[in-house]
Amino acid sequence: MERRLIELLGQTDALWLPFRQRHWQRQSASTVYYERRTLFGVGGLPWRVGGTVAERVRGLRVLAQLRKAGSVRIQYRKGEAFPLVRLVDDADDELRLLCGLAPFAESLKLLDELHRRQGDEPARWIPEEQLAGIAWGDPRQGDVLGTQAVDFSPCLARGLVESNSSVLGHAWFRLSELGHRLAAERVANGTAAHGQRPEPSPPDWDARWLYVDARNTAECEMLDAQPVDHREIGYIPLPCSFEGVG
């Protein structure tokens, strides 16, 4: 069952990582992501089980076991064959630690820094390289910005942080209204961690590679998927000349 939970974590992060150039190059990707993120807010990811009748029954039994163990929340929808499934917060944290990723408490360090940089401009977008403390074009750019994006995932999935990007794949972040309230509370009670970076634990590499494979597979599926509602336009990219003011 742990394997299935790690896969679910990878699928969740794939949904919330910032758009890059490859996403904007796919005509339907922004709409597919918009629809699925909206659905995630309702209850999670669709638990789709294909194959034979026996395989579908086994898949639903696994889901029942995960719920009984307290690892997932399930949302059934009227008229829909597949329920929505989401990791509970404790399971999400445990799996991130196993995979060597930043759990929610560490992700909050980025929320605090975002709050500090936004200052009295709550609609202001902050470029990812500023948050990471590197210049665009730095040789470490791919690793540093990729790690930071994954570190943001717990806050993105909880609706505390928003992301967007230009068609060139340069990402920006800002706090949601809910994120602003939480960040202000952390400042007020003295728990804000300005200037600190998330510190994930060493990974179990088998778990880490399973997570990466599940995340990459989920992204490829979403890039090739078609939207449910073809009238929906999805997300709009930020202009390449964008300076951060929303």
Image (spheres, rainbow, N blue to C red):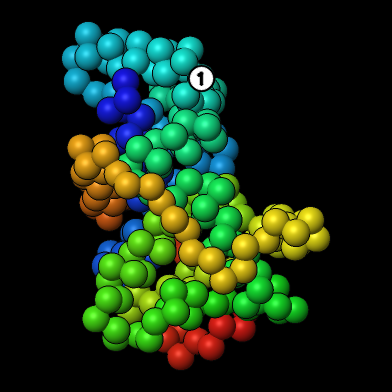
Residue 161 higher or lower than 94, as above or below: below
Residue 140 higher or lower than 162, as above or below: below
Quadrant in the picture for the C terminus:
bottom right
- How many residues crowd around disc 1 within 10 Å: few (fewer than 14), some, or many (20 or more)? few
Residue at the image position 28 percent from the left and 11 percent from the top: 58
Q: Is residue 182 left or right of residue 32?
A: right
The residue nearer to you, when weighing 109 against 214, is 109
Residue at the image position 79 percent from the left and 56 percent from the top: 189
Residue 122 is situated, as x and y percent measured from the top left of the image, at 70, 73
Residue 193 is situated, as x and y percent measured from the top left of the image, at 62, 63
| Residue 77 in sight in this render | no
Quadrant in the picture for the N terminus:
top left
Residue 14 is situated, as x and y percent measured from the top left of the image, at 35, 50
The residue nearer to you, when weighing 68 against 110, is 110
| Residue bearing the label numbered 1 | 70
Residue 66 is situated, as x and y percent measured from the top left of the image, at 42, 18
The residue nearer to you, when weighing 224 against 154, is 154
Residue 44 higher or lower than 164, as above or below: above
Q: What residue type is labelled 1?
A: Gly
Q: Is residue 163 left or right of residue 15?
A: right
Within the image, what quadrant is residue 48 found in? top left
Q: In this view, does 41 lie to the left or right of 202?
A: right
